């Protein structure tokens, strides 16, 4: 005699039909391809845009006061370091080397 659980289990599909699985696969592939293309376009656009122009555009859009203060502080430190360090001259070995 066959157990009742075995009879019930034979009528319950464990996976969706092949057509449904193929449609789901195509949908996932299309979404991933679209995401890849959009990310590549953004990367290419940002790669070709100079950093100064990017920051200028960001400032024009309006950023928080905290971010603006951090940028100004960073720029002041960079300028101070550039003033303290004289430019390297072509004729001698680099210091420490």
Image (cartoon, helix red, strand yellow):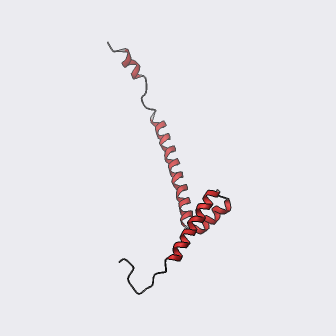
> Which residue is nearer to you in this view: 53 or 65?
65
Quadrant of the rendering where the N terminus is positioned: top left
Residue 77 shows in the view:
yes
> Which residue is nearer to you in this view: 79 or 43?
79
Question: Picture coordinates of residue 12 (x, y %)?
Answer: 43, 24
> Which residue is nearer to you in this view: 68 or 11?
68
Quadrant of the rendering where the C terminus is positioned: bottom left
Q: Could you tell me which residue is drawn at 53 percent across and 65 percent down? A: 47
Residue located farthest toward the left when viewing the structure as drawn? 1
In the rendered view, does 83 fall on the left or right side of 15? right
Question: Picture coordinates of residue 30 (x, y %)?
Answer: 52, 48
Is residue 14 shown above or below 36? above
Residue located farthest toward the bottom when viewing the structure as drawn? 91
Residue 49 shows in the view:
no
Is residue 31 shown above or below 13? below
Q: Could you tell me which residue is drawn at 49 percent across and 40 percent down? A: 24
In the rendered view, does 27 fall on the left or right side of 57? left
Q: Could you tell me which residue is drawn at 64 percent across and 66 percent down? A: 56
In the rendered view, does 8 fall on the left or right side of 59? left
Question: Picture coordinates of residue 8 (x, y %)?
Answer: 41, 19
Classify residue 62 by image quadrant. bottom right
Question: Picture coordinates of residue 28 (x, y %)?
Answer: 50, 44
Is residue 90 shown above or below 30? below
Q: Could you tell me which residue is drawn at 59 percent across and 63 percent down? A: 71
């Amino acid at each position: 005699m066959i157990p009742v659980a075995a009879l019930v289990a034979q009528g319950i599909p464990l996976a969706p039909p092949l057509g449904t699985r193929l449609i789901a696969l195509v949908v996932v592939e299309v979404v991933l391809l679209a995401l890849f293309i959009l990310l590549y376009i953004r990367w290419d656009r940002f790669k070709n845009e100079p950093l100064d122009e990017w920051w200028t555009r960001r400032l024009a859009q309006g950023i928080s006061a905290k971010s603006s203060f951090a940028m100004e502080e960073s720029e002041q430190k960079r300028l101070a370091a550039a003033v303290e360090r004289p430019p390297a001259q072509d004729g001698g070995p680099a210091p420490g080397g």
